[in-house]
Image (tube, helix red, strand yellow):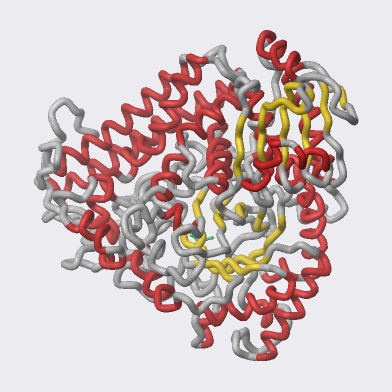
Amino acid sequence: LWLDFKPLPTETAANYKQQLRALLFPVTSQTDSVARQELLTAVNGLLGECLKSVDTLQETGTLVIGTPATLPWLAGEAIAEHLRHVGDEGYGIHHTAIKGKPTTVILANTSSGILYGVYAFLGVLQRGEDISQLATTTQPKIALRLLNHWDNLDRTVERGYAGFSLWDWHRLPGYRDPRYTDYARANASIGINGTVLNNVNANALMLTAPYLEKAATLADIFRPYGIKVYLSARFSAPIELGSLADADPLNPEVQQWWNDKVAEIYRYIPDFGGFLVKANSEGQPGPQNYGRSHAEGANMLADALNPHGGVVMWRAFVYEDTEPEDRAKQAYNEFKPLDGQFRDNVIVQVKNGAIDFQPREPFHPLFGAMPGTPLMMEFQITQEYLGFATNLAYLGTLFSETLLADTYADGPHSTVARVIDGSLTGQKLTAMAGVANTGTAINWTGHPFAQANWFAYGKMAWDPDADAGTIAEDWLRRTFGNDASLIGTLLPMMMQSRETVVNYMTPLGLHHLMGWSHHYGPGPWIKDKQRADWTSVYYHQAGKDGIGFDRTASGSGALSQYAPEVQALFADPQTCPDEYLLWFHHLPWDFRMKSGETLWEALCGHYYGGVEEVADMQAVWEAQRGKVDSTVFQEVSDLLAIQHQEATLWRDACVLYFQQFSGMPIPDGLEQPE
Ligand code: GCW
């Protein structure tokens, strides 16, 4: 991963050695101890030399690391001022003179802050940056920064493309796979502080003593890295595990069962984070089975967790057994009326878009629509709909596109980021979740570039306003080194890569054209399933008269779930951004685009352009031959070749399929597919 601390070029290393002569880092906690160990190992790798440890500040070039508790004398220094701005998890890294000696100082209020500061400092060294000017003060904008593992107890991973689950349940709790520690290191290094171990399509067994004991071992391993364990709870567990007749949240017996269960969990895991719940969605049990609302279900669990400090993350991805008039409207319809009814320790977990992790979706209309309820973001890091771990798609751009979208909930600049960081509505409980792309694959994520998505997710959970390009460059430098031409070519490739996938899969606001159920490869022809919204034809609505899903007032009316300013932007096909055109509108094939082309020409342009762009990526990568590790080079090369074949398949399948309806020729200069 990005923690492979390879030696820096000799000159850079020599420079750093001048400035880093000794380490003053008092250790008083397990977290301090792992931070110190991480620092020493990394510096040894990067500079080829051990840092000498000292007990007092004696010489110029000492790296000083600590908190007010471990370095009480720091309180008298001007630099301690920064502690006022770093909260519980933030840190400051400053180059400054202390007692007249030029010194680098990493300071924080807590050991977790120190750990994050150490990782940040190592990033500075990896990028070869000047440390004599360091002046960083930062703290996370989001309190709970989690991975969600859709990992089953048999170690299969729902929508996982990087091997099997990391959790070796069979050999836990006895065998502590060193990979658990590396997992914690990787996450801590990007600021992640929580992990939900099991699939939201939850097996109640997870809550039984044998599994709690196993989970407790993982929690013990993760704790020094500032990572808390959470579990997905199956709503019907009182029936399955407790032999109760129902799981009605208003039934006192059910409430008692959960109170006892939660108390038991805290005996195993004293700092247990709480529950994630998928209820009344895709066949999962939930409060609606008993005529109760999502709020009543969530509040029951919240009351059980509250005395112990735990939270409930209640998912708004509700996708019911009955066919909706427009699937995009369902979450808003069910949750908006419940605004203000949830307990303080409940946070509603909303996917970035209203359908399902498509290559592109407009932001979810719930963001900004529930000012009386904490809402958290759920992104999908694993590429369920973006070509699995075969296709190269840097998702930093997707994440920030959603985060920076303006909801206009409270006038302009009411971005999604401000909804979830609590600054818009004053919410205290803030969180972000990313559906993990990790597994037993030797490189953790399947595609070597998919590591960047894990990395970017962590960085954006820390700062949802962070710049996707800066993050991509950071990852590239820490992964491949600082070769200017390598960075200069791979960075634009990464930044374009997700748009490329959109181009050859679902351009112009099209969505859910993927193969049925597995979601890999094209399937625009899919129809005749049990339900309309399990077909592709439902989403693209292509016919002789045109293509696209009308979500305006003349269609499903889903657009009315957004603020008036957003509605105004999207309602008119003349002003609606091309990216969302067919998401909101059904338009004739000869509709005039802003570019002057017909809709059909533009559609073909995206499909053909997408394939060309993959060919460009192949050329860019080929130019790195000899500059990156040969195994990684070959793997990415081979995967890009597969991606090119698949992009071509997507293009040909979609263009030929839609051409049946448009009846129009392939535009000049492009070849008619066979
Ligand atoms: O993205 C869809 C997936 C399901 C998943 C569901 C959800 C865990 O296709 O596999 O189930 O969403 O988010 O609950």
| Residue 36 screen position, x and y as percent | 81, 35
Residue pictured at 45% horizontal, 78% vertical? 338
* Quarter of the view holding residue 596: top left
Left or right position of 671 against 182: left
**Closest to the observer, 600 or 525:** 600
Task: Give the farthest residue toward the top.
Answer: 11
542 is higher (above) or lower (below) than 95: below
Residue pictured at 55% horizontal, 67% vertical? 347
Task: Give the farthest residue toward the right.
Answer: 55
Answer yes or no: is residue 26 visible: yes
| Residue 362 screen position, x and y as percent | 34, 53
Residue pictured at 25% horizontal, 59% vertical? 565
656 is higher (above) or lower (below) than 129: below
Give the quarter of the figure containing the C terminus.
top left
22 is higher (above) or lower (below) than 290: above
Left or right position of 354 against 104: left
Left or right position of 317 against 544: right
Give the quarter of the figure containing the N terminus.
top right
**Closest to the observer, 450 or 411:** 411
